[in-house]
């Protein structure tokens, strides 16, 4: 069934704000406008054939495929103007100068089938949720939280070293790829953001224990920013492993800390803290040993380089990472991040750029409408609003055609497509 008869005005406006005319010609911009609607409105599975079938008088699926495979643009042609626009947009929102700015680092898998072999970004990756290896594409994301606003700011595809070697066997010269670890990619994105942030703001960088390397912490502190992060139990503080500190603190009184949960409730944690030196990191840090109750088997460990923060503040600020998980849910289940069937690394990178462009568009639309009574206040309401608008336009267009005297059978065949033929 056709779900789109014309472009969404909001999508066209958002794309115009990015001022992409230097990097994209008119036909490419029309594809971006088209995809901004198609990825939102199409059913859960977002293959190019299914996307193309959603639009009345749309393009052939091969046109969409060529936009990613051979059209002369790169992911950075969209990614860099987008992130610069988002920072300018936030700076213009009148956020309190005393409000701290938070950057989050995380990575996520887009799982594919076991038989997937031809897609260059897909390889065996360890899934920490299922505790097994899966065939998947992996990417690292840098998000931003500033006041009441949140956006996915930058992202990078991650390839294992063996994947890079395999791809490079069939490439020559400047077409060869370079290997970067996840920590390298995180550092590159932080360095890229640094000159664009307003001076004088307090900045905290949040990430889980996987990213807590001495090299990354030193780099962040060198920017004048603070770190709030998870720590693995084998890390040393003041020459002693955290598991040993846990044993040392037995019998010491707990501090009861209330943490706001993402669902709106609260949970109380039992916390002990220590101050000392993290191995190969200059200056003192504060480490929290947190557990749900006195009978818990082992605590979780958290690092904070800002010694002025209280335990409750540290744990509540760490909770800001949850928005990144919400983003992953939307890009995977609602926008089809893992539904690509493109083979080359460059084409897949473009697909990721378009999906994150659409997610940023949805956040922008949400914030633009948040001050308007009875308009969307959440991302899911934005999605539903766009879909309902397109449904109304499709129904109105079909009724207008029937009113002009076009036979009902022809109208049904035109708007229902394969569904009408199957029913017949």
Image: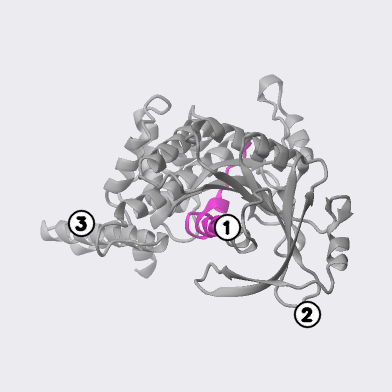
Residue bounds of the magenta highlight: 320-345
Q: Position of residue 96 (x, y in %)?
A: 40, 47
The outermost residue toward the left is 404
- Residue at 72% of width from left, 65% of height from top? 130
- Residue at 48% of width from left, 42% of height from top? 354
Q: Is residue 118 left or right of residue 328?
A: right
Q: Is residue 335 left or right of residue 14?
A: right
- Residue at 67% of width from left, 57% of height from top? 113
Res 244 quadrant in image: bottom right
Q: Position of residue 49 (x, y in %)?
A: 46, 50
Q: Position of residue 87 (x, y in %)?
A: 44, 39
Counting every numbered tag in the picture gives 3
Tell me the SS state at disc 1. Answer: helix
Question: Which mark is in front, 3 or 2?
Answer: 2
Q: Mark 3 sits on what residue?
A: 397
User: What distance separates the C-alpha of mark 3 from that of mark 2?
Assistant: 64 Å
Tell me the SS state at disc 2. Answer: loop
Within-10-Å neighbours for mark 3: few <14, some 14–19, many 20+: some
Q: Mark 1 sits on what residue?
A: 317
Residue 355 in view of the camera: yes
Magenta stretch encompasses residue 332: yes
Q: Earlier in the sequence, mark 1 or mark 3?
A: 1
User: What distance separates the C-alpha of mark 1 from that of mark 3?
Assistant: 49 Å
**Mark number, residue 295:** 2
Within-10-Å neighbours for mark 2: few <14, some 14–19, many 20+: few
Question: Which mark is in front, 1 or 3?
Answer: 1
**Mark number, residue 51:** none
Do tag 3 and tag 2 residues touch (Cβ < 8 Å)? no
Q: Position of residue 98 (x, y in %)?
A: 46, 47
Residue 410 in view of the camera: no
């Amino acid at each position: 069934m056709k779900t789109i008869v014309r472009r969404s005005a909001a999508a066209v406006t958002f794309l115009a704000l990015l001022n992409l005319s230097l990097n994209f010609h008119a036909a490419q911009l029309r594809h971006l406008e088209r995809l901004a609607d198609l990825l939102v409105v199409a059913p859960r599975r977002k293959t190019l054939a299914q996307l193309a079938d959603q639009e009345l008088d749309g393009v052939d699926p091969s046109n969409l495929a060529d936009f990613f495979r051979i059209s002369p643009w790169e992911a950075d042609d969209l990614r860099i103007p987008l992130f610069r626009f988002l920072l300018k947009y936030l700076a213009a929102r009148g956020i309190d100068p005393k409000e701290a700015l938070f950057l989050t680092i995380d990575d996520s898998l887009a799982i594919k089938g076991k038989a997937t072999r031809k897609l260059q970004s897909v390889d065996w990756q360890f899934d920490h949720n299922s505790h097994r290896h899966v065939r998947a594409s992996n990417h690292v994301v840098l998000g931003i939280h500033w006041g009441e606003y949140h956006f996915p700011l930058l992202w990078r595809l991650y390839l294992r070293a063996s994947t890079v070697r395999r791809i490079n066997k069939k490439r020559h010269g400047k077409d060869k790829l370079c290997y970067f670890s996840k920590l390298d990619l995180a550092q590159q994105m932080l360095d890229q953001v640094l000159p664009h942030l307003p001076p004088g703001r307090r900045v905290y960088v949040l990430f889980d224990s996987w990213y807590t390397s001495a090299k990354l912490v030193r780099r962040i502190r060198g920017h004048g920013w603070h770190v709030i992060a998870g720590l693995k139990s084998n890390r040393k503080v003041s020459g002693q492993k955290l598991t040993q500190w846990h044993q040392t603190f037995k019998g010491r009184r707990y501090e009861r800390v209330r943490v706001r949960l993402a669902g709106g409730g609260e949970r109380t944690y039992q916390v002990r803290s220590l101050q000392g030196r993290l191995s190969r990191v200059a200056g003192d840090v504060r480490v929290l040993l947190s557990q749900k109750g006195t009978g818990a088997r082992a605590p979780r460990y958290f690092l904070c380089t800002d010694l002025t923060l209280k335990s409750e503040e540290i744990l509540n600020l760490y909770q800001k990472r949850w928005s990144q998980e919400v983003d992953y849910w939307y890009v995977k289940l609602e926008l089809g991040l893992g539904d690509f069937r493109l083979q080359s690394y460059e084409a897949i990178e473009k697909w990721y750029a378009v999906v994150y462009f659409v997610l940023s568009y949805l956040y922008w639309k949400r914030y633009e409408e948040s001050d308007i009574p009875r308009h969307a206040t959440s991302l899911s309401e934005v999605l539903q609003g766009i879909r309902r608008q397109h449904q109304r336009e499709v129904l109105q267009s079909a009724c207008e055609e029937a009113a002009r005297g076009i036979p009902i059978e022809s109208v049904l065949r035109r708007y229902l497509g394969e569904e009408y033929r199957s029913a017949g």
